[in-house]
Image: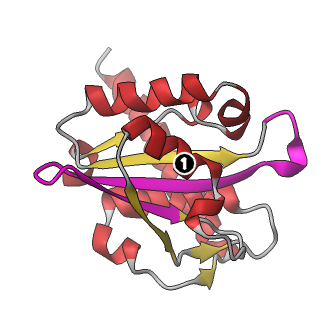
């Protein structure tokens, strides 16, 4: 699985919206530490919950994917937001935090991705985008067309993911 070895991940709790507001230096340190530790990676994934965990109604998951071009030391940033908002990348606080942490300009693009039809599917949309990006074709993800996520896709994703998760524990028990 090529994508798994070429992608690094930011810890979602260390970059969540409340910390971005209350302790931005902690978030910046985390970003710098991940990038420093994974110098050999070209892709960085950041499942990010905008807003604060303490305010249930203001939580919304988005996915930030960063691409580093090591030869030219340039960065591209891709935002996957399943909300139908017309926000531009500069309207997301996390984009400014990434630029400050990296100390480099990031060229941002908002990717047309699956949309949430009922206002609660954003977490599933982020998980599906991460799965598709890492396991499937990256280039396809970056030019994907906007469409509503279907309940059947969520159900299929949950079932497939749980089967893999459960089988990994069964596999470990066989070797004990």
Residue 95, position in %: x, y? Answer: 53, 51
**Range drawn in magenta:** 53-79
Q: Does the magenta stretch include residue 41?
A: no
Which residue is pictured at 85% across the width and 33% down the height?
Answer: 54
- List x then y, in percent, for residue 170: 42, 31
Report the front residue among 37 and 108: 108
Residue annotated with mark 1: 96
- Colouring rule applied to residues: secondary structure
Q: Say which residue appears at 28% left-offset and 28% top-offset.
A: 36
Choose between 123 and 49: the one closer to the eye. Answer: 49
Residue 140: quadrant of the picture:
bottom left
- 65, 163: nearer the viewer: 65
Image coordinates of residue 107 in percent, x first then y, are: 39, 63
Q: In this view, does 63 lie above or below 80?
A: above
Q: Quadrant of residue 155?
A: bottom right
Residue closest to the far top: 176
Residue 70 in view (yes/no): yes
Side of 152 relative to 95 (left or right): right
Q: Quadrant of residue 113?
A: bottom right
Going 79% across and 35% down the picture, which residue do you hit?
A: 53
């Amino acid at each position: 699985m090529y994508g798994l070895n070429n992608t690094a991940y930011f810890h979602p709790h260390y970059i969540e919206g409340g910390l971005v507001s209350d302790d931005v230096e902690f978030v910046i340190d985390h970003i710098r530490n991940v990038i420093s530790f994974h110098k050999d990676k070209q892709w960085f994934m950041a499942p990010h919950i905008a807003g604060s965990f303490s305010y249930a109604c203001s939580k919304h998951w988005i996915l930030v994917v960063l691409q580093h071009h090591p030869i030219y030391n340039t960065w591209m940033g891709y935002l996957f937001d399943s909300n139908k908002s017309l926000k531009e990348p500069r309207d997301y606080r996390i984009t400014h935090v990434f630029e400050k942490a990296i100390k480099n300009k990031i060229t941002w693009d908002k990717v047309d991705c699956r949309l949430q039809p009922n206002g609660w599917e954003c977490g599933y949309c982020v998980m599906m985008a991460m799965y598709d990006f890492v396991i499937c074709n990256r280039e396809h993800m970056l030019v994907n067309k906007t469409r509503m996520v279907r309940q059947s896709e969520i159900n299929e994703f949950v079932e497939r993911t749980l089967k893999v998760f459960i089988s990994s524990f069964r596999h470990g028990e066989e070797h004990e």
